[in-house]
Amino acid sequence: MRAVNGIGHHFRNDELRQRALTHASTGANRDNERLEFLGDTVLDLIAAEELFRMHPDHSEGQLTTAKAWLVSRETLAEAARRIGLANQAEFGRGMAAEAAPRSVLANLYEAVLGAIYLDAGLEGARTWTLKTLASAFAQASSAGQERNHKQRLQEFAQSGGGEPPQYNLLDQRGEAHRRAFLVQAYLGGATYPSAWGRTRKEAERYAAMEALQVIEAEPL
Protein backbone atom coordinates (compact mmCIF):
# COMPACT_ATOMS: atom_id res chain seq x y z
CA MET A 1 0.00 0.00 0.00
CA ARG A 2 1.19 3.51 -0.73
CA ALA A 3 1.41 6.23 1.90
CA VAL A 4 0.21 9.63 0.78
CA ASN A 5 1.66 12.51 2.77
CA GLY A 6 -0.87 15.14 3.76
CA ILE A 7 -4.00 13.20 2.92
CA GLY A 8 -3.54 10.74 5.75
CA HIS A 9 -4.75 7.62 3.95
CA HIS A 10 -2.76 4.73 2.46
CA PHE A 11 -4.30 4.14 -0.96
CA ARG A 12 -4.30 0.61 -2.32
CA ASN A 13 -5.34 2.02 -5.69
CA ASP A 14 -3.26 5.10 -6.42
CA GLU A 15 -5.35 5.90 -9.52
CA LEU A 16 -8.20 6.80 -7.19
CA ARG A 17 -5.97 9.28 -5.37
CA GLN A 18 -4.85 10.85 -8.61
CA ARG A 19 -8.39 11.17 -9.91
CA ALA A 20 -9.64 12.69 -6.63
CA LEU A 21 -7.00 15.40 -6.91
CA THR A 22 -7.62 16.18 -10.58
CA HIS A 23 -9.85 19.25 -10.92
CA ALA A 24 -12.22 19.63 -13.87
CA SER A 25 -10.33 22.76 -14.97
CA THR A 26 -7.53 20.50 -16.26
CA GLY A 27 -9.81 19.20 -19.01
CA ALA A 28 -8.78 15.64 -18.19
CA ASN A 29 -11.08 12.81 -19.24
CA ARG A 30 -11.17 11.47 -15.68
CA ASP A 31 -11.50 14.37 -13.25
CA ASN A 32 -12.82 14.32 -9.67
CA GLU A 33 -16.46 15.36 -10.21
CA ARG A 34 -17.93 11.85 -9.94
CA LEU A 35 -15.88 11.16 -6.81
CA GLU A 36 -17.10 14.46 -5.37
CA PHE A 37 -20.70 13.31 -5.89
CA LEU A 38 -19.98 10.04 -4.10
CA GLY A 39 -18.07 11.68 -1.27
CA ASP A 40 -20.90 14.11 -0.60
CA THR A 41 -23.29 11.20 0.00
CA VAL A 42 -20.81 9.24 2.12
CA LEU A 43 -20.13 12.32 4.26
CA ASP A 44 -23.84 12.84 4.91
CA LEU A 45 -24.15 9.29 6.26
CA ILE A 46 -21.03 9.45 8.42
CA ALA A 47 -21.92 12.87 9.81
CA ALA A 48 -25.50 11.88 10.62
CA GLU A 49 -24.45 8.63 12.28
CA GLU A 50 -21.69 10.22 14.37
CA LEU A 51 -23.82 13.18 15.52
CA PHE A 52 -26.63 10.77 16.41
CA ARG A 53 -24.18 8.82 18.57
CA MET A 54 -22.52 11.87 20.14
CA HIS A 55 -25.73 13.67 21.10
CA PRO A 56 -28.35 11.18 22.36
CA ASP A 57 -30.48 13.99 23.82
CA HIS A 58 -30.62 16.15 20.69
CA SER A 59 -33.87 16.49 18.78
CA GLU A 60 -34.13 15.84 15.06
CA GLY A 61 -34.03 19.59 14.44
CA GLN A 62 -30.87 20.06 16.52
CA LEU A 63 -29.13 17.19 14.74
CA THR A 64 -30.14 18.59 11.34
CA THR A 65 -28.78 22.02 12.22
CA ALA A 66 -25.51 20.57 13.51
CA LYS A 67 -25.07 18.40 10.41
CA ALA A 68 -25.76 21.32 8.08
CA TRP A 69 -22.90 23.26 9.70
CA LEU A 70 -20.60 20.24 9.75
CA VAL A 71 -20.93 19.50 6.01
CA SER A 72 -21.02 23.16 4.95
CA ARG A 73 -18.62 24.59 2.37
CA GLU A 74 -16.93 26.62 5.11
CA THR A 75 -16.21 23.63 7.35
CA LEU A 76 -14.99 21.36 4.56
CA ALA A 77 -12.87 24.10 2.98
CA GLU A 78 -11.14 24.70 6.30
CA ALA A 79 -10.39 20.98 6.64
CA ALA A 80 -9.08 20.81 3.07
CA ARG A 81 -6.89 23.86 3.70
CA ARG A 82 -5.49 22.35 6.89
CA ILE A 83 -4.64 19.07 5.13
CA GLY A 84 -3.11 20.93 2.19
CA LEU A 85 -5.26 19.30 -0.48
CA ALA A 86 -5.00 22.24 -2.89
CA ASN A 87 -1.21 21.97 -2.93
CA GLN A 88 -1.50 18.31 -3.89
CA ALA A 89 -4.22 18.84 -6.52
CA GLU A 90 -3.84 19.33 -10.24
CA PHE A 91 -5.54 22.43 -11.68
CA GLY A 92 -5.82 23.85 -15.16
CA ARG A 93 -4.47 27.18 -16.32
CA GLY A 94 -5.90 30.20 -14.57
CA MET A 95 -6.37 28.52 -11.20
CA ALA A 96 -3.62 28.60 -8.62
CA ALA A 97 -3.60 26.32 -5.59
CA GLU A 98 -3.02 29.19 -3.17
CA ALA A 99 -6.01 31.09 -4.59
CA ALA A 100 -8.43 28.18 -4.81
CA PRO A 101 -11.89 29.36 -3.71
CA ARG A 102 -13.72 27.83 -0.79
CA SER A 103 -16.09 25.88 -3.04
CA VAL A 104 -13.18 24.20 -4.84
CA LEU A 105 -11.51 23.28 -1.56
CA ALA A 106 -14.73 21.77 -0.21
CA ASN A 107 -15.20 19.79 -3.42
CA LEU A 108 -11.65 18.46 -3.15
CA TYR A 109 -12.39 17.20 0.35
CA GLU A 110 -15.52 15.39 -0.85
CA ALA A 111 -13.71 13.91 -3.85
CA VAL A 112 -10.91 12.53 -1.67
CA LEU A 113 -13.49 11.08 0.71
CA GLY A 114 -15.25 9.41 -2.22
CA ALA A 115 -11.93 7.94 -3.37
CA ILE A 116 -11.17 6.64 0.13
CA TYR A 117 -14.62 5.04 0.30
CA LEU A 118 -13.93 3.13 -2.93
CA ASP A 119 -10.42 2.26 -1.78
CA ALA A 120 -11.11 1.19 1.82
CA GLY A 121 -14.88 0.94 2.25
CA LEU A 122 -17.14 2.72 4.71
CA GLU A 123 -14.92 2.04 7.72
CA GLY A 124 -11.90 3.54 6.00
CA ALA A 125 -13.95 6.58 4.97
CA ARG A 126 -15.30 6.95 8.51
CA THR A 127 -11.82 6.76 10.06
CA TRP A 128 -10.49 9.48 7.74
CA THR A 129 -13.54 11.71 8.22
CA LEU A 130 -13.46 11.52 12.01
CA LYS A 131 -9.73 12.28 11.96
CA THR A 132 -9.82 15.21 9.54
CA LEU A 133 -13.04 16.72 10.99
CA ALA A 134 -12.35 15.96 14.66
CA SER A 135 -12.48 19.58 15.81
CA ALA A 136 -15.52 20.26 13.64
CA PHE A 137 -17.43 17.36 15.18
CA ALA A 138 -16.58 18.74 18.63
CA GLN A 139 -17.94 22.17 17.66
CA ALA A 140 -20.85 21.14 15.43
CA SER A 141 -23.60 21.23 18.03
CA SER A 142 -22.87 24.68 19.47
CA ALA A 143 -21.73 26.19 16.16
CA GLY A 144 -24.80 24.92 14.36
CA GLN A 145 -27.12 26.30 17.01
CA GLU A 146 -25.26 29.62 17.06
CA ARG A 147 -25.70 29.93 13.32
CA ASN A 148 -29.34 28.92 13.55
CA HIS A 149 -30.47 31.43 16.22
CA LYS A 150 -28.36 34.31 14.99
CA GLN A 151 -29.22 33.61 11.37
CA ARG A 152 -32.95 33.55 12.17
CA LEU A 153 -32.70 36.89 13.97
CA GLN A 154 -30.71 38.31 11.06
CA GLU A 155 -33.35 37.11 8.60
CA PHE A 156 -36.11 38.65 10.72
CA ALA A 157 -34.30 42.00 10.66
CA GLN A 158 -33.79 41.82 6.90
CA SER A 159 -37.42 40.92 6.27
CA GLY A 160 -38.45 44.24 7.84
CA GLY A 161 -35.88 46.19 5.87
CA GLY A 162 -34.03 47.22 9.02
CA GLU A 163 -30.46 47.17 10.22
CA PRO A 164 -28.90 43.86 11.27
CA PRO A 165 -29.02 43.00 14.99
CA GLN A 166 -26.26 44.17 17.29
CA TYR A 167 -24.93 42.29 20.30
CA ASN A 168 -23.82 44.47 23.20
CA LEU A 169 -21.48 43.13 25.84
CA LEU A 170 -22.90 44.18 29.22
CA ASP A 171 -20.61 42.38 31.62
CA GLN A 172 -17.91 39.74 31.91
CA ARG A 173 -16.75 37.94 35.01
CA GLY A 174 -14.36 35.27 36.19
CA GLU A 175 -10.81 34.19 35.53
CA ALA A 176 -9.44 33.56 32.05
CA HIS A 177 -10.19 29.83 32.17
CA ARG A 178 -13.65 30.26 33.77
CA ARG A 179 -14.99 33.45 32.26
CA ALA A 180 -18.64 34.32 31.69
CA PHE A 181 -20.08 36.95 29.35
CA LEU A 182 -23.40 38.82 29.52
CA VAL A 183 -24.74 39.93 26.14
CA GLN A 184 -27.92 41.71 25.03
CA ALA A 185 -29.38 41.82 21.53
CA TYR A 186 -30.40 45.19 20.11
CA LEU A 187 -32.66 45.35 17.06
CA GLY A 188 -34.82 48.03 15.51
CA GLY A 189 -34.56 50.37 18.47
CA ALA A 190 -35.52 47.64 20.94
CA THR A 191 -33.41 45.74 23.44
CA TYR A 192 -34.15 42.19 24.51
CA PRO A 193 -33.42 40.07 27.61
CA SER A 194 -29.72 39.56 28.18
CA ALA A 195 -28.06 36.15 28.40
CA TRP A 196 -24.90 34.70 29.93
CA GLY A 197 -22.51 32.41 28.09
CA ARG A 198 -19.13 30.76 28.65
CA THR A 199 -17.79 32.55 25.58
CA ARG A 200 -18.92 35.74 23.90
CA LYS A 201 -20.16 33.78 20.89
CA GLU A 202 -22.17 31.47 23.11
CA ALA A 203 -23.66 34.47 24.95
CA GLU A 204 -24.60 36.04 21.60
CA ARG A 205 -26.33 32.83 20.58
CA TYR A 206 -28.34 32.75 23.79
CA ALA A 207 -29.13 36.46 23.45
CA ALA A 208 -30.43 35.85 19.93
CA MET A 209 -32.57 33.02 21.26
CA GLU A 210 -33.99 35.31 23.97
CA ALA A 211 -34.82 37.95 21.36
CA LEU A 212 -36.50 35.40 19.11
CA GLN A 213 -38.65 34.15 21.98
CA VAL A 214 -39.89 37.68 22.65
CA ILE A 215 -40.45 38.44 18.96
CA GLU A 216 -42.29 35.18 18.30
CA ALA A 217 -44.53 35.72 21.33
CA GLU A 218 -45.67 39.13 20.10
CA PRO A 219 -49.15 39.28 18.48
CA LEU A 220 -49.20 39.54 14.71
Image (spheres, rainbow, N blue to C red):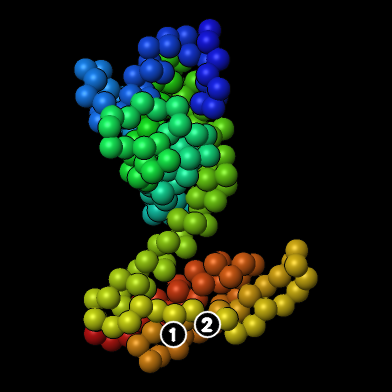
Q: Is residue 158 left or right of residue 143?
A: left
Point out residue 211 in the picture as x, y percentages from the top left corner. Answer: 43, 79
SS for dot 1: strand
On the image, numbered disc 1 is attached to which residue?
Answer: 186
N-term mark: 2 or 1: 2
On the image, numbered disc 2 is attached to which residue?
Answer: 168
Crowd band around label 2 with a 10 angstrom C-alpha radius: few (<14), some (14–19), many (20+):
some
Say which quadrant the C terminus sits in. Answer: bottom left
Q: Residue at x 64, y 67 (%)?
A: 198
Residue 56 sits above or below residue 109 on the image: below
**Residue 183 is at least partly visible in this image:** yes
Q: Indicate the quadrant where residue 164 lies.
A: bottom left
Q: CA distance from mark 2 to mark 1?
A: 7 Å
- Point out which mark residue 145 bears: none
Residue 186 sits above or below residue 128 on the image: below
Q: Indicate the quadrant where residue 209 lies.
A: bottom left
Residue ranking furthest to the bottom: 189
Decide which of 58, 109 is in the foreground and name it: 109
Point out residue 38 in the picture as x, y percentages from the top left corner. Answer: 31, 26
Decide which of 124, 48 is in the foreground and name it: 124
**Residue 47 is at least partly visible in this image:** no
Q: Is residue 116 left or right of residue 177?
A: left
Q: Amino acid at mark 2?
A: Asn
Q: Residue at x 33, y 82 (%)?
A: 163
Q: Amino acid at mark 1?
A: Tyr
Crowd band around label 1 with a 10 angstrom C-alpha radius: few (<14), some (14–19), many (20+):
some
Point out residue 170 in the picture as x, y percentages from the top left corner. Answer: 60, 85
Decide which of 24, 203 is in the foreground and name it: 24
Decide which of 81, 57 is in the foreground and name it: 81
SS for dot 2: strand
Q: Residue at x 53, y 19 (%)?
A: 4
2 and 1 marks in contact (CB < 8 Å): yes
